[in-house]
């Protein structure tokens, strides 16, 4: 089993940014879902609950796109590419996530 590659600071920061983007996306989606559920509580009002405004849908799409861009940036990073080529991608990914968590917990 291959060892994880050393994780450079910029890759740790990208993971932290990805974690924050995921949290922002989840928070927005959950908040809007709760608002619509409160506004349209009856089971037969499912269409109304799922009819977000254009602005809300655009914000959700923007948050998803931001998250996807970070995923792709991490994937294109030289360390990630080296890990993929050296068959240590899983180990390196886990090390990257752990390093980001440790910084977040220290803050």
Image: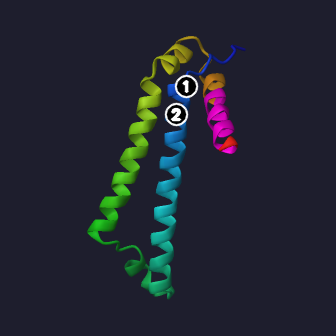
Q: Is residue 69 left or right of residue 34?
A: left
Q: Is residue 104 magenta?
A: yes
Label 2 secondary element: helix
- The quarter in which the N terminus is drawn is top right
| Residue at 59%, 21% in the rendered image | 7
Please tell me in which quadrant of the rendered image residue 61 appears.
Answer: bottom left
How many neighbours does mark 1 have within 10 angstroms: few (below 14), some (14-19), or many (20 or more)? few
Image coords of residue 73 (percent x, y):
41, 30
Q: Which residue of the protein is positioned furthest toward the left in this rendering?
A: 54
Image coords of residue 11 (percent x, y):
52, 27
The segment highlighted magenta reads: 94-105
Q: Vertical placement of 8 versus 94: above or below?
A: above
Q: Which residue of the protein is positioned furthest toward the right in this rendering?
A: 1
Image coords of residue 45 (percent x, y):
43, 85
Q: Is residue 8 left or right of residue 54?
A: right
Instruction: Residue under label 1, please give it.
Output: 9
| Residue at 67%, 33% in the rendered image | 98
């Amino acid at each position: 089993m291959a060892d994880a590659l050393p994780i450079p600071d910029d890759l740790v920061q990208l993971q932290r940014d990805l974690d924050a983007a995921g949290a922002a996306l989840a928070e927005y989606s959950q908040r809007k879902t709760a608002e619509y559920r409160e506004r349209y509580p009856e089971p037969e009002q499912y269409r109304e609950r799922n009819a977000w405004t254009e602005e809300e849908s655009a914000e959700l799409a923007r948050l998803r796109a931001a998250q996807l861009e970070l995923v792709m940036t991490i994937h294109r990073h030289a360390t990630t590419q080296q890990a993929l080529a050296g068959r240590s991608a899983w180990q390196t990914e886990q090390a990257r996530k752990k390093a980001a968590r440790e910084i977040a917990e220290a803050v």
